C-alpha cells in the first residue's frame, strides 16, 4: 500500500477581529513561529483532537464490566501517592 503525500499548499483566507489577530501574533512570536505556521499547527491539533474524540471502542460485555469496576475503585498506589504529594504550580 503506497501513501501519497500532498506537497501543494493551498491558501485559506480568514477574517478575524484585530484583538484576536494581535493575540495570535503574540503567541506565535512567543513560540518563534510565523502567524501562518502558528495557526496551521493550532488548527491541525484541533482537527486531530476533534477526530480522536469521535473514536468508538467496542468491547464485549465482560470487558466493559471489568472496565467499569476499575473506574469505580478509588485511586491508590505509589504513583497516586507521589502525585498527591507533588507541589501545586498555582500554590507558588
Image: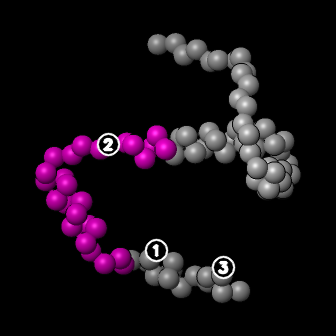
Percent position of residue 24, x then y: 78, 51
Percent position of residue 10, x then y: 71, 22
Quick check: marks 2 and 3 in contact, CB under 8 Å? no
- Within-10-Å neighbours for mark 3: few <14, some 14–19, many 20+: few
Residue drawn 73% across and 21% down? Answer: 9
Residue 57, compared with residue 84, is above or below; it is above
* 78 sits left or right of 8 in the view: left
Question: Which quadrant holds residue 68?
Answer: bottom left
Residue 89 marker: 3
Residue drawn 81% across and 51% down? Answer: 18
Point out the frontmost of discs 3 and 1: 3
- How far apart marks 2 and 3 lie (CA) works out to 34 Å
Percent position of residue 12, x then y: 71, 29
Q: Which residue is mark 2?
A: 56
Highlighted magenta segment, given as a residue range:
50-76
Farthest-out residue, left: 62
Nearest to N terminus: mark 3 or mark 1: 1
Amino acid at each position: 500500500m503506497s501513501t501519497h503525500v500532498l506537497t501543494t499548499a493551498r491558501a485559506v483566507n480568514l477574517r478575524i477581529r484585530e484583538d484576536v489577530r494581535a493575540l495570535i501574533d503574540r503567541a506565535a512570536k512567543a513560540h518563534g513561529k510565523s502567524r501562518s505556521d502558528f495557526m496551521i499547527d493550532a488548527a491541525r491539533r484541533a482537527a486531530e483532537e476533534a477526530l480522536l474524540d469521535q473514536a468508538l471502542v467496542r468491547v464485549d460485555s465482560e470487558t466493559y464490566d471489568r472496565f467499569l469496576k476499575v473506574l469505580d475503585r478509588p485511586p491508590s498506589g505509589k504513583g497516586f501517592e507521589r502525585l498527591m504529594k507533588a507541589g501545586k504550580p498555582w500554590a507558588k
